[in-house]
């Protein structure tokens, strides 16, 4: 099957190519460096107008019952189902993911639509026993307002869906700043949402506004007091700049930042399974997932055998055009990513690391793109280099002898997103789950490729936010504690007597 052309993709989303003929924002394909389109970047003034439109839309939206709001998300999910291949292909074109992963990302949106639709009937509050006679206490959840969402190039559609679909059923409107590296994908998502809105009938205009541009747009969103929640995915550095700005005006930030995900492989591990998992987690998405496996902590007795098998698998994994069947590893997003990878490998070499792979590939066929052989780096210790996230396919291999040492190594990094252990020993598995300081701790599967049903996010420098499943919806609502007096007396809590009548 040949890959669809950009023109046919635009057509399937109803996007007029003339919209992408001029502007400062350049959409480029990492596959070959080709310019896919140009579009105008937002300015602080246009962003402000978009926030105002979203605010007006939210005022109407919050009055619509939540299950009816869920119906809009259900319809959006139907549009995504119908356009799964086309949107997946656009993700491939703009972010460089292989087709299975591009479509997998759209499937994550579809799953999220179903989850959020169900959630729209389950925005449950509590009833609480009051200490006062004739009183009732409860907790109610209310729409929050306009939610700002900042997303990264590597999951250009799914991460927005985690946020947007919950926020919509919670009665919020959204202003989305996608990565400036994936502007077209964002417009395609918006076009499908617009179709769902037309089918829905009375959805207010402006429920989702897209603001395109560089970091300055994200910062303006962070600074705007009309945006009570800013949900941001990206590097720890980005989060460290953004979060204080949001806090400065007492807004809330929901952060999903860098990961430095480790996997412990113990002597009892099923090595065949471990090998397959390591491959998917470490080289899938060309090592550009926040959940990518970056640190392999292997028992010294099995390390040589595992590294030997990994080396063979790495050497034969097909790196190439992500549109071609059989490709497992597509391009890095850009030249900067390539340079960062090479700088990390040079540092590893200087530290005495043994490096397998890491070289540039396909330079003649794709001179304006960055394809690499994923790298395995054996290092004697967990140096500052290993403790830093390099957003590229580098797998550091560290050896351990005692299980406690493996646990200590595992947690001794600033980030805390995803983690895994391969073991058949129940005690090791349970000890790992208790000890891992990450938001995700898996047994006998890798750290990446989470389902949407669980809360997604991590601790420490990963930022503490949780998105997608479980109770993540609560972040998009305002919680109120209500006490109702249905008696004719006015007893005070804590037994306080105030004035002549008590
Ligand atoms: C990300 O890289 O920002 O668990 C998100 C995973 C995907 C999501 C990754 N479901 O790998």
Image (spheres, grey):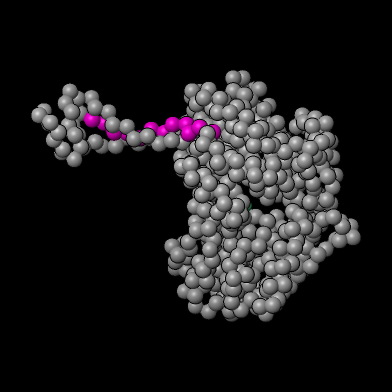
Q: Which quadrant holds the C terminus?
A: top left
Q: Residue at x 75, y 32 (%)?
A: 13
Q: Is residue 453 visible?
A: no
**Most common secondary structure along the magenta stretch:** strand
Q: Residue at x 63, y 59 (%)?
A: 292
The answer to whether residue 366 is magenta is no
Residue 147 lies, in percent from the top left, at 54, 37
Residue 6 lies, in percent from the top left, at 82, 39
Q: Is residue 471 visible?
A: yes
Q: Quadrant of residue 192?
A: top right
Of residue 19 and residue 267, the one placed in the foreground of this image is 19
Magenta part of the protein: which range?
135-146
Q: Residue at x 55, y 77 (%)?
A: 400
Q: Which quadrant holds the N terminus?
A: top right
Q: Can you name the residue that lies furthest to the right here?
A: 364
| Looking at the image, residue 329 lies above or below residue 137 | below
Of residue 319 and residue 186, the one placed in the foreground of this image is 186
Q: Is residue 402 left or right of residue 108?
A: left
Q: Can you name the residue that lies furthest to the left here?
A: 500
The answer to whether residue 142 is magenta is yes
């Amino acid at each position: 099957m040949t890959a669809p052309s950009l023109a046919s993709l635009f057509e399937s989303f109803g996007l007029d190519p003339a919209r992408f003929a001029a502007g400062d924002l350049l959409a480029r394909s990492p596959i070959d460096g080709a310019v896919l389109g140009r579009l105008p970047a937002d300015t602080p003034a246009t962003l402000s107008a978009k926030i105002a439109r979203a605010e007006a839309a939210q005022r109407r939206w919050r009055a619509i019952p939540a299950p009816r709001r869920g119906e809009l998300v259900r319809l959006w999910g139907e549009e995504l189902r119908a356009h799964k291949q086309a949107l997946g292909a656009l993700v491939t074109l703009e972010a460089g993911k292989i087709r299975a992963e591009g479509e997998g990302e759209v499937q994550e949106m579809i799953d999220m639509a179903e989850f959020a639709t169900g959630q729209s009937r389950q925005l449950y509050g509590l009833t609480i026993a009051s200490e006062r006679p004739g009183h009732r206490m409860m907790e109610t959840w209310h729409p929050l307002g306009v939610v700002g969402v900042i997303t990264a190039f590597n999951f250009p559609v799914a991460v927005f869906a985690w946020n947007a679909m919950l926020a919509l059923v919670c009665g919020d409107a959204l202003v989305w700043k996608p990565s400036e590296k994936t502007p077209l994908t964002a417009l395609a998502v918006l076009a499908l949402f617009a179709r769902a809105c037309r089918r829905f009938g009375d959805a207010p205009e402006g429920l989702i506004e897209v603001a395109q541009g560089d970091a300055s747009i994200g910062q303006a969103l962070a600074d705007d007091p009309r945006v009570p929640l800013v949900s941001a995915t990206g590097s720890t550095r980005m989060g460290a700049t953004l979060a204080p700005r949001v806090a400065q005006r007492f807004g809330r930030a929901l952060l999903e930042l860098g990961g430095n995900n480790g996997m412990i492989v113990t002597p009892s591990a099923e090595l065949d399974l471990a090998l397959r998992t390591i491959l998917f987690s470490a080289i899938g998405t060309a090592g550009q997932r926040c959940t990518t496996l970056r640190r392999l902590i292997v028992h010294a007795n099995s390390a040589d055998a595992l590294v030997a098998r990994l080396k063979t698998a790495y050497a034969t994994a097909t790196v190439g055009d992500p549109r071609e069947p059989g490709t497992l590893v597509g391009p890095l997003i850009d030249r900067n990513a390539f340079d960062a990878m090479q700088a990390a490998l040079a540092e590893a070499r200087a530290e005495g690391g043994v490096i397998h792979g890491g070289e540039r590939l396909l330079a003649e066929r794709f001179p304006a793109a960055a394809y690499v052989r994923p790298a395995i780096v054996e290092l004697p210790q967990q140096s500052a280099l290993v403790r830093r996230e390099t957003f590229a396919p580098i797998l550091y291999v560290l050896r351990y002898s005692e299980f406690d040492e493996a646990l200590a190594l595992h947690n001794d990094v600033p980030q805390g997103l995803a983690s895994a252990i391969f073991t058949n020993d129940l005690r090791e598995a349970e000890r790992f789950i208790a000890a891992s300081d990450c938001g995700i701790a898996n047994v006998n599967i890798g750290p990446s490729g989470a389902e949407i049903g669980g809360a997604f996010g991590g601790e420490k420098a990963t930022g503490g936010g949780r998105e997608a499943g479980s109770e993540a919806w609560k972040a998009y609502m305002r919680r109120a504690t209500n006490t109702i007096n249905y008696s004719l007396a006015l007893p005070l809590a804590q037994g306080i007597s105030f004035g002549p009548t008590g």
